[in-house]
Structures are given as C-alpha cells and as structure tokens.
Image (tube, rainbow, N blue to C red):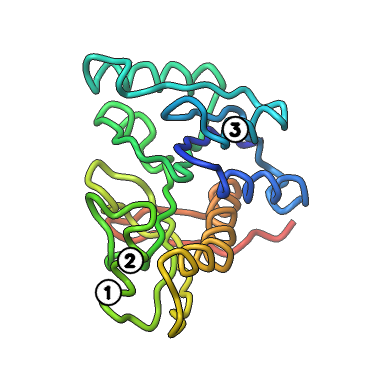
Amino acid sequence: MLNIGVMVSGSGTNLQAILDRIDDGMLKHCCVATVVGSKEGIYALERAEKKGIPATVISRKSFQSVGDYDKALIAHMKKYDVKLVVLAGFLSLLGDGFVKTYENAIINIHPSLIPSFCGKGYYGIVPHQKALEYGVKITGATVQFVELEYDSGPIILQKPVAVLPDDTPETLQKRVMEQAEWTILPEAIRLFSEGRLKVDGRKVIISEAKEM
C-alpha cells in the first residue's frame, strides 16, 4: 500500500478526486494517510475529516525559517510513513530540505500546459486569465514532479482542454478541473503506485503495465 500525504490550500477538489478514485478502486494500492493544510479554515481539511483521515495545519508563517518549516513537514510525513507527497492546490513554497528528502516523490498539478502560463505568480485563476488574454485555443493541465523552481520539474502527464469563444476565467477554470485535473492527477498517482515512473534527466519514462 502506498501512503500518500496530500497538501492543500483551498477547497480540495483535487483531493476529492483522489479520494473518489480510491473509493472506486482505481487507486487500489493507495491510501491517503494524512492531509496537510497551509492555513486554517479551508474546506479541504473538512473533506479529510469526513473520511476519517488525519488532517492538520502546518503553516509557513508559524516558523522563523524555511528550514524549520521543512523539518516540521518532514517529521509529519515520516510519522505517517508517507512515500508520495501530492500537492493538490498547495500554494506555499517548499524548501530545499523537504524537496530533497522526497526527491522524485512529490507531484504537483498545475492548471496549464507547461511551459505555458506557469512559474511564480501563476496559480489559482491566473493561468486561465492569461490563457484568455493570449487568445490560445487550447489549454489544459499538467502533472509533474516537483523541483525547487516553480513549475520546473519533469512532466509526468498533460491533458489538453479546448478554450471556448464565450469562456470566462471562471468557466475555463471549472472545465480544466473537470476535464483534465481530476483525470490526470489520479492517473499519475496510479502510475507511481505501480512503479511505472522513471525520471531520466528532464524526461519521465512511463513503463508498460506488468502482467498479473
């Protein structure tokens, strides 16, 4: 069983997508062992509590340094024997210590087709606003391994979503979540849990499923 630690900063729709795929058997080798919020009062923590999943807040603001923040996160993940960290709408910056401890074992979902509309400041509604400003016809979502620089890690999966003529940032955001994010994030977790992801430089190699 793969113990997952999910880190959240908002309502937790991607967390819910993971929980749903565990419930329906797609992620049959996975367990959300703990959920960590970046702040109090977010609905994602309620989602976890309703499922009986240990949920807590570890806020960057509570620590004097990134190093101390990292140590607290590492200790918490070790407590629950977490082998894969999933950033599901997590907006706090992780430090070098945490990223190195979980090298090639932290994945993030980003609401664009990286390298478009990504990097520092491109989170939440912003990538969708920029996609509409640029007039692109296709956007989507990306799952990648996390490195220290924003949105720079090796790409695992991407899924395109059409931009419609009457889209607003809000309608586009909703459709990207429904048509891309909620599909490829659980799929990336499944591939990881089956040992089918290998990082080779800047590339992620996905191996074929083994016959049972």
Disc 2, SS: helix
Density class for disc 3 (Cα within 10 Å; few <14, some 14-19, many ≥20) is: some
Asked if marks 1 and 2 touch (Cβ < 8 Å), the reply is: yes
Residue 48: give x, y in percent of width and height. 64, 32
Asked if marks 3 and 2 touch (Cβ < 8 Å), the reply is: no
Say which label, 1 or 3, has the lower sequence index. 3
Which residue is found at the position 45% from the left and 76% from the top? 167
Q: Nearer the viewer, residue 129 or 49?
A: 129
Give the vertical position of 59 relative to 25 (above or below): above
Circle 3 or circle 2, nearest the eye: 2
Amino acid type for the residue under numbered disc 1: Glu
Which numbered marker is on residue 133?
Answer: 1
Give the vertical position of 45 relative to 127 (above or below): above
Amino acid type for the residue under numbered disc 3: Asn
Quadrant of the image occupied by residue 34: top right
Mark 3, residue position: 3
Residue 198: give x, y in percent of width and height. 43, 53
Density class for disc 1 (Cα within 10 Å; few <14, some 14-19, many ≥20) is: few
Which residue is found at the position 36% from the left and 68% from the top? 113
The CA distance from mark 3 to mark 2 is: 35 Å
Give the vertical position of 2 relative to 170 (above or below): above
Which residue is found at the position 62% from the left and 34% from the top? 32
Circle 1 or circle 3, nearest the eye: 1
Disc 3, SS: strand
Amino acid type for the residue under numbered disc 2: Gln
Density class for disc 2 (Cα within 10 Å; few <14, some 14-19, many ≥20) is: some
Which residue is found at the position 58% from the left and 30% from the top? 45
